[in-house]
Image (cartoon, rainbow, N blue to C red):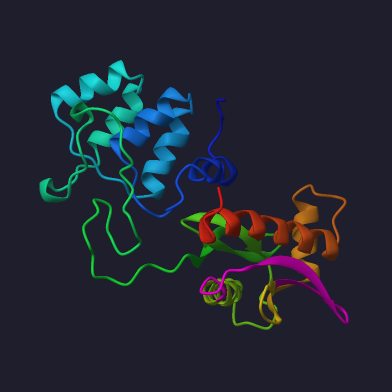
Amino acid sequence: MKLSGITATSVLLLLVLFPASLAAISVFDVIRLSQERYADEEIIRLIRTTDSRFLLSADDTIRLRKEGVTEAVIREMLSRPAPKQEAQAPASEGPAKSSLPPDASRGSAGVPTGAQPEPLFSASSLKGRDAGHALAAVTLAGMEVLIVRERDGFSSTLARARAAAGTLNGLAERPAGRFAVRVAGPDTRVAFEASDGPATDVLTVTPTDVAGYRAAGVRQVSAATLASLWASLLNDYWGIMVVGKR
């Protein structure tokens, strides 16, 4: 199967192949993706998303070409050199082995980092404005998951996105459960229904959020349908990137 275009969805599909989604990928992973005919743009995006580093010799680049890796991908790999003491195994060493670290306490080369892991979810401001409203995104590994268009009582849209990201990071410590739509009076919310506890509200859908999606061309949208979309997106990302479900 060959995917086309650089989108969050396509990169997510690539990350399905790697349960430790935030770990660097290896030379062998690049070969595998190339042989499975993923687009150059998607492989390069994955390399950058995972901040992967490589130490390639001239023989390694020859091997990569023979294995079907394109010049564009090889150039990207050469532009991201790894320190020799942390280098991944070169492509010429033999049959492919999983190069992912055995646990999250190890860095991109399986070397303990001793540092606190980065939070899974974060927030970022987006350039431009939508119908006069500033935009902010809740992101996961650099990928935009949810886009908010209103402050909703916070000091800014970015503050609202940060609050949602903080809630999600807290929920990730006990990830068993699912996201669902919850109606509380006039509000329509996205909530996490824990398997062993009460529901936790993550985000309230506002009229401005709905208007923004309508302006973007999604005509048949309401607070309920937008909340359902957000819940579905979170369930997909959660299952793959947090729970580690293949």
Observer-nearest residue: 119 or 150?
A: 119
Res 223 quadrant in image: bottom right
Res 27 quadrant in image: top left
Could you tell me residue 77's position as x and y percent? 28, 35
Judge from the rendering whether residue 172 lies leftward or rightward of residue 50; answer left or right: right
Residue in the picture at 61% in, 72% down? 157
Q: How many marks?
A: 0
Q: Residue furthest left?
A: 84
Judge from the rendering whether residue 113 lies leftward or rightward of residue 216; answer left or right: left
Residue in the picture at 58% in, 62% down? 137
* Residue 226 part of the magenta-drawn span: no
Give above or below for 185 relative to 2: below
Could you tell me residue 51's position as x and y percent? 33, 50
Give above or below for 72 relative to 115: above
Q: Main secondary structure of the magenta part?
A: strand
Could you tell me residue 206's position as x and y percent? 77, 71
Residue in the picture at 30% in, 32% down? 96
* Residue 190 part of the magenta-drawn span: yes
Q: Which image quadrant: the N terminus?
A: top right
Res 9 quadrant in image: top right
Q: Which residues are magenta?
A: 171-192
